[in-house]
């Protein structure tokens, strides 16, 4: 019969070094930038007929086509650029996270109909 | 019992990808929450991290699949200018116009936030792997993005289901 000491799980990979925080910071901030971008283009598209028309990259989908493709491009480009910049460094995740959360909240506000329809 | 071509696509968009998303979320949430070095052995941790990576990546892929099929395949049928399109029908009646003016307007935008946040969560899990078990802060950041992805997808999904009930795509 196993003793309590034998049943106790052993700490998993105790001495393994943590990878640099730069690539994670790049993902976190790129996510915030992309969500903010979605809110911004949504609000701008409502505020200006010209911008709304310019966002219609596809006739069947309408302005949503431009908004979503711009957001995806901004996400990919900002992730790639930030990753290249922070690849081997260790930026403070706390400040990056605060910036990202602020951008996400602003992006959510920008995609809320009561907010963006006020600019029509 | 028959589904039209458009109804099949609505099903793939809302149910097939949606079910994958929900399944991956449930598994991923439980896995991330309980991923603590003091609770598992080294061998157990390796197995759980492998499963967690698969679950979070599946959730992100399902979220991208949902918004891509929704926006580029189903949405054009919804917003068609034809008088019998769901959008035309909803706007024709003041009592149902809000389903489009608030519900659809919110859904079509907030839905795209879900795959972005799910990708960040999956990226963190893939990048840190077993280190998430030792570092509570990193685990909580990944969990935050994971749950936020689900919350935005849930808002879009609930409105999608209600709008489909009010004016389905045929």
Image (spheres, rainbow, N blue to C red):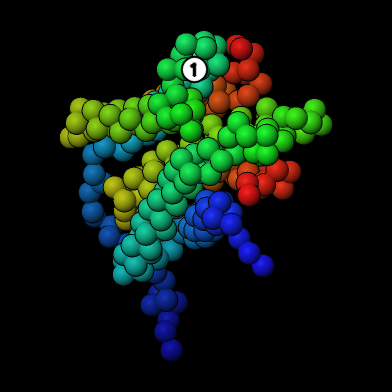
Badge 1 density bin: few <14, some 14–19, many ≥20, Cα 10 Å: many
Residue occupied by mark 1: A52
x and y percentages locating residue B124 in the rendered image: 35, 45
Q: Tell which of B42 and B13 is nearer to you.
A: B13
Q: Residue furthest right?
A: B95
Horizontal placement of B48 versus A53: left or right?
left
Residue for point 57% across, 23% down: A109
Q: Tell which of B65 and B9 is nearer to you.
A: B9
* Helix, strand or loop at mark 1: helix
- Tell me the quarter of the image containing the N terminus of chain B: bottom right
Horizontal placement of A84 versus B38: left or right?
left
x and y percentages locating residue A100 in the rendered image: 42, 27
x and y percentages locating residue A113 in the rendered image: 63, 24
x and y percentages locating residue B49 in the rendered image: 35, 60
Residue for point 37% across, 59% down: B54
Relative height, residue A7 to residue B118 (above, below): below
Q: Tell which of B130 and A6 is nearer to you.
A: B130
Q: The disc numbered 1 marks a residue on which chain? A: A
Horizontal placement of A92 versus A51: left or right?
left
């Amino acid at each position: 019969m196993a003793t309590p000491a034998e049943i106790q799980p052993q700490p998993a990979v105790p001495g393994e070094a943590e990878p640099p925080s730069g690539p994670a910071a790049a993902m976190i901030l790129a996510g915030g930038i992309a969500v903010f971008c979605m809110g911004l283009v949504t609000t701008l598209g409502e505020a200006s007929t010209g911008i709304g028309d310019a966002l219609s990259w596809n006739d069947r989908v309408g302005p949503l086509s431009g908004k979503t493709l711009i957001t995806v491009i901004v996400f990919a480009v900002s992730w790639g650029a930030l990753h290249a910049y922070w690849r081997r460094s260790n930026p403070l995740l706390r400040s990056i996270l605060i910036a990202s959360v602020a951008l996400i909240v602003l992006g959510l506000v920008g995609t809320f109909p009561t907010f963006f329809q006020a600019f029509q | 019992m028959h589904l039209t071509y458009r109804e099949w696509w609505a099903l793939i968009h809302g149910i097939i990808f949606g079910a994958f998303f929900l399944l991956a979320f449930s598994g991923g949430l439980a896995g991330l929450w309980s991923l603590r070095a003091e609770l598992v052995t080294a061998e157990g941790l390796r197995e759980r991290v492998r499963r967690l990576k698969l679950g979070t990546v599946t959730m992100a892929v399902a979220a991208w699949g949902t918004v891509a099929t929704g926006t580029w395949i189903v949405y054009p049928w919804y917003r068609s200018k034809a008088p019998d399109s769901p959008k035309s029908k909803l706007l024709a009646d003041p009592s149902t116009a809000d389903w489009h003016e608030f519900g659809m307007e919110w859904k079509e935008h907030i839905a795209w936030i879900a795959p972005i946040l799910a990708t960040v969560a999956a990226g963190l899990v893939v990048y840190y792997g077993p280190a998430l078990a030792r570092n509570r802060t990193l685990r909580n950041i990944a969990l935050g993005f994971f749950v936020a992805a689900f919350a935005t997808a849930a808002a879009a999904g609930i409105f999608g289901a209600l709008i489909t009930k009010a004016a389905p795509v045929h």
